[in-house]
Image (cartoon, rainbow, N blue to C red):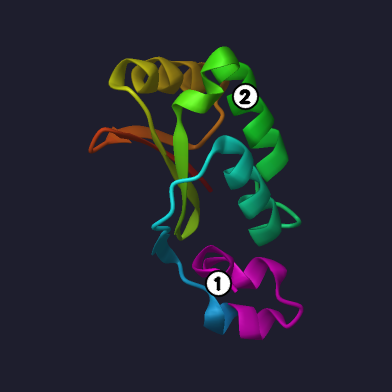
Amino acid sequence: MTPLMKAYADCWLRDYNEGLIARDLNYRDNLWLTLSEWEVAMAEATPNGYNDFEAHEIANKLKALLNDKIECITIQGAREGSVACYIKAEQSLLKKLAEQIRKIHLADEIDIVNNELRLWWD
């Protein structure tokens, strides 16, 4: 089991109580992934979604916003009580992406922290 899967254990383990014990509500992955890799990892970690977060839907909206810049970003999975991620890219692209994400209300929290775009869903 990957550390990201363990962080979301309560979302996919058949025994929910076991998942509650195994999960990590304060987790940030060490791996930076492509958007496609992140989409697959988060879909596995949250197979039924998580409140308003659904991995394929979010990834498709990010792909549409990024258009030809998809390869210019990397994403790090996280869990901060709820679903979170961090996006790394050139600062001008991060600022533009943050502005676009705010316009369509893609996430509940949208911040640039330490030169990374942080997204969080309740």
Give the amino acid at mark 1.
Answer: Lys
Quarter of the figure with residue 63? top right
Is residue 118 shown left or right of residue 47?
Answer: left
Q: Which residue is drawn at 53% across and 74% down?
A: 23
Is residue 27 shown left or right of residue 113?
Answer: right
The disc at residue 63 is 2
80 within the magenta span? no
Where is residue 53 drawn, in percent x and y?
63, 44
Quarter of the figure with residue 89? top left
Q: Which residue is drawn at 49% across and 16% down?
A: 100
Q: Can residue 87 be seen from the camera position used here?
A: yes
Placement of 31 over or under 16, stated as above or below: above
Q: Which residue is drawn at 52% across and 26% down?
A: 71
Give the amino acid at mark 2.
Answer: Lys
Screen quadrant of the N terminus:
bottom right
Q: Distance between the residues labelled 2 and 1?
A: 27 Å
Q: Can residue 54 be seen from the camera position used here?
A: no
Magenta region: which residues? 1-19
Placement of 85 over or under 109, stated as above or below: below
Where is residue 105 drawn, in percent x and y?
54, 26
Q: Name the residue under label 1.
A: 6
